Image (cartoon, rainbow, N blue to C red):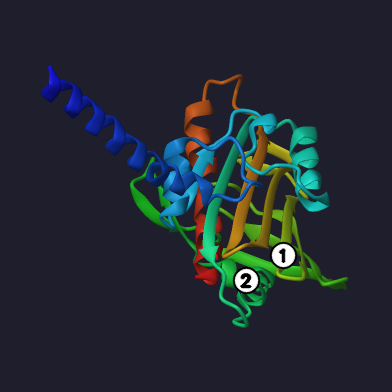
Amino acid sequence: MKKSSAFLLALAAFSLILMPVAAQAPAAIPAMLVGLSAKEAESLARGEAVIREVKSPSSLGLAGFDAEATAIRKEIAALNPNYLTEVIALIPYKTGTGQVDKLAAALSNLEGYVGIPYWSVQMQKTYDLFDKMTILTKKPMPGGAYLEADQHMKPFEDYKASYEYRLGVEMLTFRSVNLSPLSYKGLRSVSPGGMKWFLYVFHSGDYLVYYGAGAVKAFDMLGLIRDRLKVSFIGRVSAFFDHMYARLK
């Protein structure tokens, strides 16, 4: 009995020693990121990007902690998308290296979007996310620029979209909206304003928090092609934000 009691006491003490260690990974996640599973938090703590399908705008992983984050949440909620994807990552902050400026340069170079690799799950083949990008308008705005382009993204027909970005102190916001319909073989899949991409990068402690969201309100034939469209839209959002995420490393 004495040996058994001693063993149990030792096991309990060992468990208490381990408990703070196990709690360390989630503690590294900035408070602005919410609703993450333990697995997702652990992936972020390991330096991996997390891609999440979100069922409702109320479940977004970015808290409305400031004006920028609140605006993103409100605009996505107003769209009421039926396809919503997030890409979240923590990038070690490197003082004086101009990480955010480099990302802004990549985002403003629309011609550079051509050739971004996109893996098609359905076709089991890699395509260019965009194979055409013609700038129609470019206007300066406080801290950034506003651009419009005529572009092509398979399998949709040509469509127009706007892009705007703004730089602040160790932060960047980016927003893209389709200005004309996305149609496939003559069938309108997404109405103007129905596909929006957002990016918010900001400094928090030892990291740059990288938060991207793609929201789409699409006609999916009353759910008949929902699974197919879901994979397609998630893949496209992931391809774009993964490409831009690499510019910060």
Q: Label 2 vs label 1: CA separation?
A: 9 Å
* Mark count: 2
Q: Is residue 118 left or right of residue 248?
A: left
| Residue drawn at (38%, 39%) of the image | 19
Q: From this viewpoint, is residue 230 visible?
A: yes
In the rendering, which numbered label is found on residue 136?
none
> Would you identify the image quadrant in which residue 143 lies?
bottom right
| Residue drawn at (65%, 54%) of the image | 158
Q: Is residue 118 left or right of residue 141?
A: left
| Residue drawn at (80%, 39%) of the image | 74
User: Could you tell me if the residues under marks 2 and 1 are in contact, i.e. CB atoms within 8 Å?
Assistant: yes
Q: Quadrant of the N terminus?
A: top left
Question: For mark 1, does the 10 Å Cα neighbourhood hold few (<14), some (14 to 19), or many (20 or more) residues?
Answer: many
Question: Circle 1 is placed at which residue position?
Answer: 172
Badge 1 marks a residue whose secondary structure is strand
226 up-or-down from 115: above or below: above
The image position of residue 226, as x and y in percent, is 53, 27
The image position of residue 178, as x and y in percent, is 73, 49
Badge 2 marks a residue whose secondary structure is helix
Amino acid type at mark 2: Leu
Q: Earlier in the sequence, mark 2 or mark 1?
A: 2
The image position of residue 75, as x and y in percent, is 79, 41
Amino acid type at mark 1: Leu
Question: Circle 2 is placed at which residue position?
Answer: 103
| Residue drawn at (61%, 34%) of the image | 83
78 up-or-down from 115: above or below: above
Front-most of residues 18 and 5: 5
The image position of residue 248, as x and y in percent, is 55, 70
